[in-house]
Image: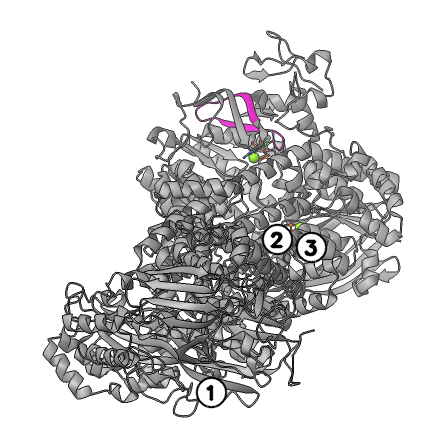
Amino acid sequence: KTNKGTDSGGTKNTTLVVENSFDLTTADPGRVYEVTGGMVAHAMYEPLLTFAGGDVSKPVPLLAKSFEASADGKVLTLKLDETAKFSDGSAVTADDVVFSFNRVKNVKGNPSFLLDGVTVTAPDAQTVVLTSAKANPALPYLLPTPALGIVNSKVAKAQGAVDAEGADKSDKAETWFNANSAGSGPYTLQSFSTTTEVVLVANDKYWGTKPVYTKIVLRNVTNSVQKLDVVKDASQLALDLSPDQAKDLGAAVTVDRASTTTTFFLFTNMNPAISPVTSNPKFQEAVRYGLDYAGIMSLAGEGAVQAPGLVPDKLLGALAAGDSLKRDLDRAKAALAASGYSGQEIPMEYPSDITKNGIDFGVLAQKVQAGLTEVGIKVKLAPAPVATALPNYRDGKEKLGLWLWGADYPDPSDYLAFLPGGLVGLRAGWKAGSSPDLTTIGDQAAIETDSGKRAALYQDLQRKLNEVGPFMPLFQSAQISVMAKSVSNFVYNAVWTVDFGALK
Amino acid sequence: MRSRPYLRFVLVRLGALVLLAVGITLVSFILTNLVPGDPAAANLGQRALSDPAIVAAFRHQHGLDQPLPVQYWKYLTGLVQGDFGTSQRSNRPVGDELAEYVPATLELASTAVVLSVVVGVGLGMLAAMRRNSWLDQLLRVVSLAGVSMPTFWLALAAFFLLFYKWGILPGGGRLDPGLDPPPQVTGLYTVDALLAGQWDIFGNAVFHLIMPALVLAAYTVGLLTRFTRASMLEVLGNDYIRTAQAKGLPGRTIVFRHVLRPALVPILTVAGLAFGSLLSGTVLVEQIFSWNGIGQYAYQSALNLDLPAIMGVSLVVAVIYVTVNFVVDLLYGVVDPRVRLQ
Amino acid sequence: MSLLDVSDLRVLLPTADGLQPAVDGVGFTVGEREIVGVAGESGSGKTISMLALLGLTPPGARVTGSAGFGGQDLLALKGKALRDVRGRSIAVVFQDPMTSLHPMLTIGRQLTEHVRHHLGLSKRAALDRAAELLDLVRIPDPRGALGRYPHQFSGGMRQRIAIAMALGCSPDLLIADEPTTALDVTVQAGILRLLDRLRTENGLSIILITHDLGVLSSVADRLYVYYAGRIVETGATSGIIQQPRHPYTQGLLRALPRAEDGLTPIGGTPPSLGAVPAGCAFHPRCAFAEASCAVDRPELVDGLACPINPLVRS
Amino acid sequence: MSTQNVADALSPGLKLRKNRRRVWRPLGVTGLVVLVIWILVAALAPVLAPHDPLGQQFDRFLSPSGAHWFGTDELGRDVLSRVVYGARVTIPLSLLLVVCSLVIGAVVGAAAGYYGGWLEMLVMRTADLVFAFPAIILAMAVVAALGADLTNAVLAIVVVSWPSYARVARGLVLSSRNADYVLATRLLGASGRRSLLVDVTPNVAGPILVLATLDVGNAALLLSGLSFLGLGARPPAAEWGAMVAAGASNFDKWWLGLFPGLAILTLVLAVNFLGDTLRDMLDPRTARAVIQ
Amino acid sequence: MSLLQIEDLQVSYRRAGHPDVMAVAGADLSVAPGEIVGLVGETGCGKSTLARACLGLLRPSGGTVHFDGAPVTPLGRRPRPAAQRRLQMIFQDPFASLNSRRRVGAQIGDALRLNPSPTTVGEWLTRVGLPESAAGRYPHEFSGGQRQRIAIARALAAQPSLIVADEPIAALDASAQAQIANLLVDLARSEGVSLLFISHDLAIVRQIADRTAVMYLGRVVETGPTAELWDTPAHPYSSALIGAVPRPDGLHRLPDELPGDVPDPASPPPGCRFHPRCPVAFDRCATEDPPAITWQDRTVRCLLHTEGEPLHAIN
Ligand SMILES: Nc1ncnc2c1ncn2[C@@H]1O[C@H](COP(=O)(O)OP(=O)(O)OP(=O)(O)O)[C@@H](O)[C@H]1O
Ligand SMILES: Nc1ncnc2c1ncn2[C@@H]1O[C@H](COP(=O)(O)OP(=O)(O)OP(=O)(O)O)[C@@H](O)[C@H]1O
Ligand SMILES: [Mg+2]
Ligand SMILES: [Mg+2]
């Protein structure tokens, strides 16, 4: 019958049942991008560099035993660990790295942007050289991303994987990767379903420390049921409980709360053509100071932090908690009066079907709405499933938008997207050149290689954003992981959530 | 002389089925394409979405860059070869995904149907035999409560009480976690487990089926109870029942041989239709019981505007529905000689 | 010694206004090898009184009186004892041959099930017997007919099959409730001849219910004329037909199309259940009614329930 | 045809016999009373609700007490007030849905039955198609695409629910078109359309009414089901299905889901009690038993 | 000149997946002004089909129906032409021929509104023996006989010159049968309306009809003045029908049996349609379709009779 984790130490010849509301479309490391996919891929495909535990501020060696950036920040040289082996026993070589990275770029999947402007070469079997067009100080922080896990190129090629230009049409390996694995990680794929469960089994040829659990069953379960299951010991690890659900769980389970790199934010459209009202700076001020931050934080729950700026607290260049905005109703009301707002309803769009870290957008939106109502702003909620909401968002047509941004990789450079003309900036109707001042700082920050200076630049950037930008950062949600007492050594990592190989 | 009209009837119905299938694909195609919403947006990451090359690649890969009639024609020609297209969400063939989810739902829905027929017809007979008694009144209230019950609410209540509070039944899923499903033959875990001789798996699968099937059956039990009662009463009022009584046959014989059979005809109809409503009900029930069937699949696909998947699900559900009702029609022939011999 | 001796039969039926008498103290006898005719307008209680004998009244009905049959009182029988009489000693043929046979069971099944139940015959023996009976009622190809269904036969054939079914256990008494009303005259003639033959050849006693006095005139030995749940006149058939004494019987006969005179309907309509007039139930429609008719309820004396006894005939 | 609707099985040519209906029908009366209460609750919501249904003014997750009979929800709103206001969403929308499907279905079905030919063919094949089409999937797709909003949901459901009425209406028109009483009127010189209007309509009305009554319950269930899935009511409106969904994510806060669920149940049950009783009153079988 | 002239009328029913049924297969019949014609025959012989075809409720597949000199047009969606409204019908089932949801007065009123006349609903109700107050009531408040009176009132209110009555008394009680038959005939006579009275009750037809037509399997096999036909039936089928009528004379005479049933009209026997059941059939009957022989005011289709000879009784 079911083998459940026991407290007897040593190697547990056991199964670990993990429950997660799946955000999963593929197990192909060349395409994987979603949260659940990252968890799965990370267990099977080791990257060159990794993060130790939950600390994402410093990349550390994994398949690459050392790495070194050139002074201009454009070239990153890595030396591979010659003991590293794939699950079929063959050694991990630089060719495999070149193949893996080129494939990610050329299949034009969700993660291919990670390697935009980066070329990868292998001077010898143990050396990989990554060359960027511009100084790329963020590159080492990118490499631990699950999508950049290294694939056994011989096996992959045999299954139709292609790394050359045009791979988006010619690569035929995804189906194979959804049923098998060819990485060097502690687990291999036994079965895979994007909606039911994913089963991983320990890689018996693993070159590192053997994992404790021989089998990981990752099941797709809604958060409310996860709670019941973990309390009833029907599962040993639940990953999606909301802060409310995680209250009063009793002594049978351990609760781990960690702040994530996911930032929930509100924006007001800067484009007067889209919204004459919200593009008014006074109106933005009214919103910024009118939001009920305390009320919102009560929803975000224990473990979450109010976001002083867009860059999450775990990352370089994050603002200190003291920089957080406080509600100032008088100021908000005054600003609103000055803005000439005449009481019209403003639709606030948000993705209704997304629940992240147990935070339901619908509930959050209602809280935001209530806060703004107190100021005198009439907000009409306009929820839609992501599929429908995203096009409007992408096209910069939302007057008010409530969204989240999860760090693609743990480096503040990911947040340059919020600048005018940037990916997210445009969504808020913020055209390139609208704020030359900010753009200049952003450009500097992007290529600055000195950590100290980088941090200062990013902090400066965020303070200015908080004054003139259309974004109102709300909070970083808390990852709440609930596990049976039998499970130990759990550490939440913002990039891959949980490292199954490290669990005891 | 006996088989020809019947055969003709079967063939005509099969032809109608094919036409219906084409109609379903057309409707779902038009519908999913008419409404605003961009599948690329739903199925690409935020970063990728802003990269025109990736979006173009996505659109090209799923044929979304072609004119609609061409897309539809390609879909149809693929369908003829058993190809349901490729899911935009998972990039897997929709056919494969359906093959994965349909059996789960079939297992659940058939269990619920069998349950409803047994319980519903039984209760209905009881009510008819004891008509106007307090039992009849009680059954009437109970059956109306069954059809009035919000399925999702009942599911939550059952889950909360039977699993969480009392621990009588297992929670979600088709098997206890950690148990491997039986080797796939039919995709129905119970059947496959039996085929493989895995009794523990069979027991576990049945154990997991009980709660969702009961919840799902609540509506149809109510429906069938009401209909069986009405149908039985209708038959009981017939002259030929009085004839049977006048022949001195025992009550049991009369009920089972003389009353039940004609009463079955409308019951069959309702049972067939009930199967359709069950398929819809699964959307809500599967959600709560983590039952990975087409209900969940449909929900996910609809949210993600995964066109091939939506079309595939609609098609499968429609075909199941039509097939069930087709079988019901054939059963009429078995039950009623007047149908068979005409 | 008569086969069936019913006295003071009362049947109260449940209606919206409570229990109402549908049959109000009737008595009749049926002798061996006798065809007894029961006549009367629709709703006069003919069917109900026969159903009461076999306990087939609708649920909630109350039946009193006595019905001696083979040494036991039918009305006192219950459960298995009653079922053993039904179909075995007393068989019934109902009015509508289109609805009184089960549409989904083969003729063979319907002809044999009660025979096997009552007589314990084997399936084969019962089928043989069924074929014989079908032959007796002149169904062509009796063997083949056993495998067919009622809808494959015409109305007349179905009524013959129903009769064959009734004869299955060789009953002593056959109650035929309007067996020919739904049929054409040509077919009716055949059924009447069949009944007559069964009486003479098989020694069957028959109660023949009908409102067609012409039919009774041709086969019945004795008549009972019902009106509003009571018997108003009884006697030998020829006597009643040729010299009806009760005004109601006279009216019935005059309403029949006969060559001699035109149609002379009885005025008014028969009373409905629960609205039977006091005194003589027929007095509101009676041309000879006197004041006392509205008060005194006439008893059946010397085969006539009419104290006025109008011998005047028009 | 196989894809016959439940409704067809329900109502083959019903006739209302008025004269001797049973006066005391406890279930029907109960249903009517409860329904009237709900309608009153909806109408008088501002008077009855103790608090603002949208006001996030209390502590979150207060369990039921004297101050908050039904407790408070995840945003600190009074659940009782929300349940009361929820009647304003579900009842009118269910009625709207049924009325729309009824009008469309009855007109289309009657026209199909009356004109016959290709029109009938087209209508009935479309009805078959829609019947076979999984309603909730269609509704989900439409709502997903047009945005979560109950009016969109109503639209989507109307698209799939008119055929039951069309079938019944067509069946009744077809059967009454050749009924003796219609032929008699026609022989007197009435036009086909007039006889449809004068002779057929009153006979079709009864069964359609029963069907509609029973359907109000189904509509309420479907709408709240969609809201439960997050595809229905637009927040912050108080809608029962959405409220149950909130309860679903907070299992141990049983009051969140229990009361709105009971609200749906009682409303639908009341409607069904009423519809069932009406059906009995219209049903010839019962009618026969009552008359004889 | 006859008011209604049916010549070689053929009416078929289409049945999906089966051959057509020719329910009326070449029937001839005429009704003169003011005449009452009785049409008798066994169940399924096509009486109702013929009646409906006369009124245009069914479209004939062959032959003609003329009313008042003009062909009867099949009923479409438009109102019937005013001239044809003088041809009315009374149905067999008084429960089905009145709309249970409309007041009696409104239904009779239809006739007056569509065929204007100076009479009133009340007058018509009185004529058929019902109180004027009946107008405000619904059909279910009346007995079968009373309903049939209402139906008669409705038909007469349209001022017809011919009424086709399809078994108008078959569904009624014995006592009501005579009442309704009398009423219908009396009113027809007093209004000068012709009547085509369809019945399988020969005795009634004999009482009321001026002329009787006997129908067998889609054909009219014999017509003639009622008394003559009754006394000297010329067709063996007529003879069998008459012999089968039980006589209420108290003489214990069993009626004569005619073995067999009316054959399925979908596959009629060749030759004379009656020959398989005919007690006096001979070889030619199985192959030759007997022509209509007319002698004075009688017509018969039987090979036992030859053209030009007086018709004789068959017994
Ligand atoms: N099941 C029943 N429930 C209530 N009343 C009934 C029932 N069956 C018959 N009756 C009533 O009982 C009375 C006698 O009915 P019965 O059937 O005996 O009449 P009948 O003489 O056989 O008439 P018919 O010639 O129509 O068969 C009638 O008034 C009838 O309405
Ligand atoms: N709608 C129909 N479709 C197919 N066949 C029909 C239809 N109506 C009648 N028939 C057949 O046509 C033949 C004549 O029927 P019709 O109703 O005219 O007979 P009828 O003489 O009026 O009989 P009855 O005395 O029973 O009223 C019968 O064999 C019948 O089965
Ligand atoms: Mg009777
Ligand atoms: Mg007829």
Q: Amino acid at mark 2?
A: Leu
Image: A150 above or below C2: below
Reading the image, the residue beneath label 1 is: A247
> Looking at the image, is mark 3 or mark 2 nearer the viewer?
2
Q: Is residue C168 above or below residue A43?
A: above
Residue A414's disc is none
Position above or below: B254 against A75:
above
Q: Which mark is residue B259?
A: 3
Q: Position of residue D120 (x, y in %)?
A: 42, 40
Are labels 2 and 1 assigned to the same chain? no
Q: Amino acid at mark 1?
A: Lys
Q: Which residue is mark 2?
A: B268
Does the magenta stretch mainly form a helix, a strand or a loop? strand
The chain carrying label 3 is B
Question: What amino acid is labelled 3 in the image?
Answer: Val
Q: Please say whether residue D147 is visible from this viewpoint.
A: no
How far from the left and from the top, in percent, is residue B73? 42, 40
Q: Residues within 10 Å of mark 3 (few under 14, many from 20)?
A: many
Q: Label 1 vs label 3: CA separation?
A: 58 Å
